[in-house]
């Protein structure tokens, strides 16, 4: 059997209707009911029926993707109880889902943290407007040079061929121009602000206050850290600090995938963003996404791999 890694979706993967057919199972529906009790609003309604405008709000979107990812994970565990994973990881908010399934934080605490994290990040966007640009076709050295020229910072190192930069609107526009001039491709992303950059410092400070009194347990299996690209330490205080750094530091997704030494990756939650990135990193990787009944039923072969 190949070594498997479970990975969890990040913000931007959401869509209206996510998780709805899985929730025909009362055990899955209970995930949404438990989240509703924590949040004080109807997250289930927003996930299943929308409107899309609500689902794109960071304070709704982050817990919504988390709960749908946990619902997908729970449904998979019931359907394939013999499938085990050597490690877990996730992109940005997905790393919080990975920490939850590894036993670091309980469900209710993670829902509460992610609602606040989304709210704090949106507040930081409003206070310090910024943006992000995806750069493709240039090497890391070339992109780092563009950062030096423009004041943009490296936000996500997703693969050898895709790196995302963050910064002020002016820095992002300059980085887009510089990337095109260097022979690469550049797409300015439709996002609320400069995530994973120093412009998120206010969000990090507010999150630090919230997390101060929340206990972080040692993970039951390796959880790969976005900040280091290596497994988190067993020390809860170190995990807390790394998750605060994650708000303002680069996401080293390429490093996480390579360091895991996994050959099979199963993505849990809405969309197939991580599956695409993992295939781009190495075409030989086996990937699957679990987000609804159809993908759950079609996963038998990869679960047994």
Image (cartoon, helix red, strand yellow):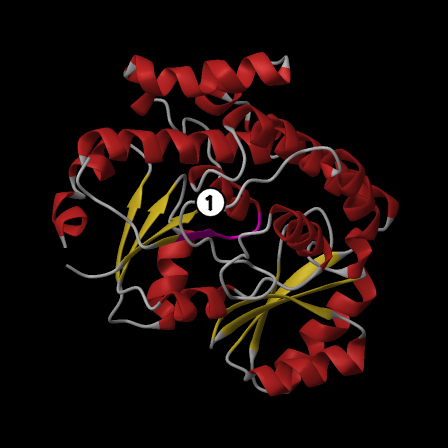
Task: Give the prevailing secondary structure in the magenta stretch.
Answer: strand
Alpha-carbon neighbours of circle 1 within 10 Å: few (<14), some, or many (≥20)?
many
Q: Is residue 153 left or right of residue 254?
A: right
Q: Position of residue 110 (x, y in %)?
A: 57, 32
Task: Report the side of 23 relative to 133 (left or right).
Answer: left
Q: Secondary structure at mark 1?
A: helix
Residue 243 inside the magenta-drawn segment: no
Q: Where does the image place residue 287, in percent across and percent down from the top left?
A: 27, 56
Query: Is residue 268 placed above or below 28 in the rendered structure?
Result: below
In the rendered image, which residue does mark 1 sit on?
A: 98
Residue lying furthest right in this view?
127
Q: Is residue 2 visible?
A: yes
At a point 46% along the width and 45% down the height, the residue shown is 98
Tell me which corner region of the image, top left, top right, bottom left or bottom right, holds residue 48: top left
Q: Residue 179 location, x and y as percent? A: 64, 79
* Highlighted magenta segment, given as a residue range: 88-92
User: Residue at left 52%, top 45%?
Assistant: 218
| Residue 12 showing in the rendered view | no
Which quarter of the image is occupied by the C terminus?
bottom left
Observer-nearest of 209 and 250:
209
- The image position of residue 193, as x and y in percent, is 73, 51
Q: Is residue 298 left or right of residue 237?
A: left
Number of numbered tags placed on the structure image: 1
Which of 181/233 is in front? 233
Residue in the picture at 41% in, 55% down: 274
Query: Which image quarter holds the N terminus?
Result: bottom left
């Amino acid at each position: 059997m190949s070594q498997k890694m479970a990975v969890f979706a990040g913000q931007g993967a959401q869509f209206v209707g996510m998780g709805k057919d899985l929730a025909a199972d009362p055990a899955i529906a209970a995930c949404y009911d438990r989240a509703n009790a924590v949040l004080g609003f109807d997250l289930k309604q927003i996930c299943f029926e929308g409107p899309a405008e609500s689902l794109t709000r960071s304070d709704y979107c982050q817990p919504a993707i988390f709960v749908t990812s946990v619902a997908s994970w729970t449904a998979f565990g019931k359907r394939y109880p013999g499938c085990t994973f050597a490690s877990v990881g996730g992109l940005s908010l997905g790393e919080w889902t990975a920490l939850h399934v590894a036993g670091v934080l309980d469900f209710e605490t993670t829902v509460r943290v992610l609602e606040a994290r989304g709210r704090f990040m949106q507040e930081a966007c409003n206070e310090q407007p910024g943006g992000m640009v995806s750069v493709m076709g240039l090497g890391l050295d070339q992109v780092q040079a563009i950062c030096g020229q423009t004041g943009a910072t490296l936000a996500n190192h997703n693969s050898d061929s895709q790196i995302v930069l963050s910064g002020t609107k002016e820095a992002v526009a300059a980085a887009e121009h510089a990337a095109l001039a260097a022979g690469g491709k550049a797409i300015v992303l439709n996002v609320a602000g400069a995530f994973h950059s120093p412009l998120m410092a206010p969000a990090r400070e507010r999150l630090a206050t919230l997390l101060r009194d929340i206990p972080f347990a040692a993970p039951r299996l390796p959880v790969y850290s976005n900040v280091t690209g290596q497994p988190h330490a067993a020390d809860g205080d170190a995990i807390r600090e790394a998750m605060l750094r994650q708000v303002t530091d680069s996401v080293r997704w390429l490093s996480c995938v390579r360091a895991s030494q996994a050959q099979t990756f199963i993505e849990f939650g809405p969309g197939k963003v991580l599956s695409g990135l993992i295939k781009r990193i190495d075409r030989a990787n086996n990937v699957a996404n679990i987000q609804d009944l159809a993908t759950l039923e079609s996963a038998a072969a990869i679960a047994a791999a």
